[in-house]
Image (tube, rainbow, N blue to C red):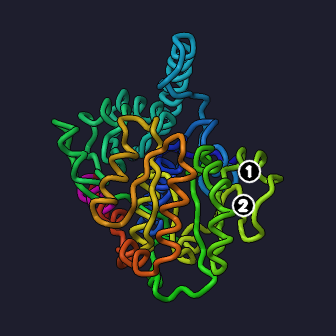
């Protein structure tokens, strides 16, 4: 493990899901390029995507044993509260000896210890909320933040009293380049299916059911389905069409999106921002249990911009998914209308410009 030196470092925290973790990575990449002499460190949880990605990365990091609170029994809530108290106390001890320059949090329960320690010690902290509806942690900590960077204007009115700035959702370096138009794609066309970094059983099962008929009809298409690591083990040996490919996790998401003519996905804010940056249309299936229905709000915003078709998760999801995929796989004009022009993402610059102005960074 690459142990962090927190003294005068910019600390990034956020995780659990890719929607929280990847914006933190994007901001860290931007900060490293802008201030190469400034130390950078990550704080996260021992579970979630950061626990899989940080240990093999170049980023100094500390992973803490904390858990979420939502949807848990009273006993597990009490256990989560104890773990949070213990993690916060451990960080406070470390940060009294080596005080960070600032803490930047992108949400998720893994960010709670760092934010609470920063607030207790008077360390400046910043929040980024990617979703259309703020999470519980952001709502709790927003009033004390130097700034809350918002992915969408709609967040501002839900955080009264906070110093908000609409910045968009940061995307990783791989997405910060020109992307070719969907018009440049050639056969065989690729349908990309995503369920988030951890996978989504409902989408996985629906696509496994719908794929054979779609690929029999459209012989100039392939399907690439990111299942999530656990789901991959469940699905890898199931019978499927020879042009239906499964992957537990896709590392080169920017290149894979660019090579795809249509995307089926959950509606996490990071994925929505990446789709807009690459310029690919989508069929979005919001996670029905997302906090404050934020994925539904994200999907509604994409549909309002005519970038996506919104499909609710339901008992006969496979039938609805097959129908919507059929109508777009067989109609190049419909795909083109959804894809629109790739939209350059300036969220990293906006956030870091604001950080520099507020903290006196050159």
Q: Position of residue 158 (x, y in %)?
A: 22, 38
Q: Quadrant of residue 192?
A: bottom right
* Whether label 2 touches label 1, CB < 8 Å: yes
Give the residues in magenta: 352-358
Above or below: residue 237 compared with residue 138: below
Residue 174 appears in view: yes
The answer to which of 253 and 203 lies nearer the viewer is 203
The answer to which of 134 and 245 lies nearer the viewer is 245
The answer to which of 17 and 144 lies nearer the viewer is 17
- Please, what secondary structure does the residue beneath circle 1 have? helix
Q: Residues within 10 Å of mark 1 (few under 14, many from 20)?
A: some
Above or below: residue 255 compared with residue 72: below
Which residue is at a point 47% across and 69% down the rendered structure image?
A: 327
Q: List the single residue furthest toward the right.
A: 237
Which residue is at a point 36% across and 27% down the rendered structure image?
A: 120
Residue 50 appears in view: no
Q: Position of residue 305 (x, y in %)?
A: 28, 64
357 part of magenta stretch: yes
Numbered circle sitting on residue 232: 1
Q: Position of residue 362 (x, y in %)?
A: 31, 65
Q: Main secondary structure of the magenta part?
A: helix
Numbered circle sitting on residue 292: none
Which residue is at a point 63% across and 82% down the rendered structure image?
A: 188
Which residue is at a point 32% across and 40% down the rendered structure image?
A: 134
- The CA span between labels 2 and 1 is 7 Å
Q: Position of residue 42 (x, y in %)?
A: 53, 47
On screen, residue 264 versus residue 30, left or right, reads right
Q: Give the labeled residue for mark 2.
A: 246
- Please, what secondary structure does the residue beneath circle 2 have? strand
128 part of magenta stretch: no
Q: Residues within 10 Å of mark 2 (few under 14, many from 20)?
A: some
């Amino acid at each position: 493990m690459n142990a962090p030196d927190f003294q005068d470092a910019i600390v990034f925290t956020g995780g659990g899901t890719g929607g929280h973790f990847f914006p933190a990575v994007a901001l860290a990449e931007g900060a490293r390029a802008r201030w190469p002499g400034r130390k950078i460190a990550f704080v996260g949880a021992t579970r979630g995507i950061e626990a899989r990605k940080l240990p093999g990365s170049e980023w100094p990091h500390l992973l803490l044993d904390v858990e979420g609170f939502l949807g848990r029994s009273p006993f597990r809530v009490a256990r989560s509260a104890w773990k949070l108290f213990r993690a916060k106390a451990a960080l406070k001890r470390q940060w009294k000896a080596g005080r960070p320059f600032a803490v930047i949090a992108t949400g998720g329960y893994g960010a709670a210890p760092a934010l609470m320690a920063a607030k207790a010690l008077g360390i400046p902290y910043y929040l980024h909320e990617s979703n259309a509806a703020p999470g519980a942690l952001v709502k709790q900590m927003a009033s004390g933040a130097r700034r809350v960077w918002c992915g969408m204007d709609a967040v501002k009115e839900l955080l009264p009293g906070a110093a908000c700035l609409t910045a968009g959702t940061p995307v990783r370096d791989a997405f910060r380049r020109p992307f070719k138009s969907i018009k440049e794609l050639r056969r065989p066309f690729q349908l990309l299916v995503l369920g988030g970094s951890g996978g989504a059983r409902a989408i996985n099962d629906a696509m496994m059911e719908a794929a054979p008929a779609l690929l029999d009809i459209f012989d100039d298409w392939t399907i690439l389905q990111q299942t999530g690591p656990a789901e991959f083990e469940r699905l890898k040996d199931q019978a499927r069409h020879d042009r239906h490919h499964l992957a537990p996790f896709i590392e080169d998401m920017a290149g894979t999106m660019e090579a795809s003519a249509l995307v089926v996905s959950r509606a996490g804010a990071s994925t929505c921002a990446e789709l807009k940056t690459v310029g690919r249309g989508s069929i979005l299936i919001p996670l029905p249990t997302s906090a404050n229905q934020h994925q539904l709000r994200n999907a509604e915003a994409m549909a309002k911009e005519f970038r996506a078709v919104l499909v609710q998760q339901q008992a006969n999801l496979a039938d609805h998914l097959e129908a919507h995929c059929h109508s777009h796989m067989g109609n190049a004009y419909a795909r083109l209308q959804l894809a629109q022009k790739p939209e350059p993402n300036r969220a990293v610059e906006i956030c870091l410009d604001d950080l520099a102005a507020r903290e006196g960074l050159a």
